[in-house]
Image (tube, rainbow, N blue to C red):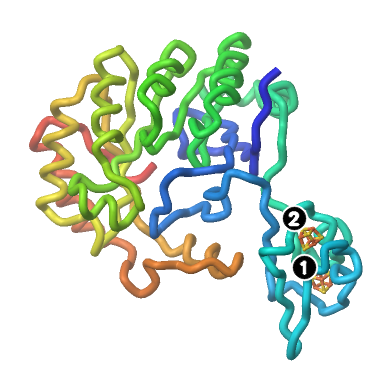
Amino acid sequence: MASGIVFDIKRYALHDGPGIRVVVHFKGCPLSCWWCHNPESQSPAPQLLYRGERCVACDICVGACANGAIVTSGGTMFTDPAKCRQNGKCADVCPSGAREICGARLGVGDVMTEILKERIFFDQSGGGVTLSGGEPLCQPEFAAALLAECKRYGIHTAVDTSGFVAPEVLLGIIPVTDLFLYDIKHMNPEKHMEYTGVDNDMILSNMLRLGERGAVINARMPFIPGVNTDDENMRATGDFLAGARGVTRLNLLPYHSAAEDKHDRWGMEYRLRGAAHPPTENSLRRAAEIVEALGVSAVIGG
Ligand code: SF4
Ligand code: SF4
């Protein structure tokens, strides 16, 4: 059976599709959004993460690393990326949880075992399973196999996607995907490139293709003042969605700073620092009105 790299399986999720859901977070993403909520998901392989504030300076990890990757200098610990094999031997012995390997290879059967434990909640709430990431369709065979297995058990399926994937991959999973949660980040190609690292052309054309093939699409937009909330972008977004088939609504997801803490925790650069702030109620309402005036249902929040 297919297998893939998963970094989290979240239970009781309420904002990733209808009802109570299990969200399976796949590792790997072709985008590098400035506001990424799961920066540890971007690299496709399992990865060593280090939380300096938890370290109790016992030096046990130094002895556990056969590759000599961990060095201390002037009281500061440093892991040499050129020497680190990401095998987690140091994380296994770290007594404080300062070291952790993010991501593990799991088979479809392993993930289904976890999913089926929550089945009673799906039945009672109209919930199901959502594949998220990272970008779940970066591991297309694993994603397709897991979706097919969920459908075999009669479980509702959703795929949370950036849309930046080969069209045949996206279209190929329509028969086993009840709902696409489809991110629209910016309508301006240059801005999209600046803030996410990729062009939006394939993302937009893929959404049109999905709709033409009968997919049900819930568009979602991270609403980030200073990035994409201006009237011009909201009108362009509304125009585009109004012309796409299969789009049931646009969710405006208000920016918050939780991602900033996560970048800090894992020692990653947060490029939106100081440049964005949570949106006001008024700005959210105004954006929703612009989109609704163009015939697209808008919902504030997840
Ligand atoms: S993950 Fe492995 S190679 Fe890397 S620092 Fe830890 S023990 Fe050494
Ligand atoms: S084993 Fe953990 S707590 Fe001890 S020095 Fe290494 S990172 Fe710090």
Q: Give whichever of 5, 158 is nearer the camera.
A: 5
Q: Is residue 21 above or below residue 45?
A: above
Residue in the image at 56% along x and 26% along y: 129
Is residue 193 toward the left or the right of residue 97 in the image?
left
Query: Is disc 1's CB within 8 Å of ligand 1?
Result: yes
Q: Which mark is drawn over residue 69? A: 1
Residue labelled with disc 2:
85
Ligand 2, by image quadrant, is bottom right
Pick out the residue farthest to the bottom. 74
Mark 1 touches mark 2? (CB < 8 Å) = yes
Q: Secondary structure at mark 1?
A: loop
Q: Residue at x 73, y 54 (%)?
A: 86
Quadrant of residue 194 in the image? bottom left
Number of marks in the image?
Answer: 2
Compared to residue 270, the image places residue 232 above or below, namely: above
Quadrant hosting residue 80: bottom right
Q: Amino acid at mark 2?
A: Arg
Disc 1 marks which amino acid? Ala
User: What element does badge 2 sit on?
Assistant: loop
The answer to which of 22 and 170 lies nearer the viewer is 170
Q: CA distance from mark 1 to mark 2?
A: 9 Å
Q: Residue placed at 46% from the left, 28% from the top?
A: 159
Q: Is mark 2 within 8 Å of ligand 1?
A: yes
Of pointers 1 and 2, the one earlier in the residue sequence: 1
User: In the picture, which quadrant includes the C terminus?
Assistant: top left
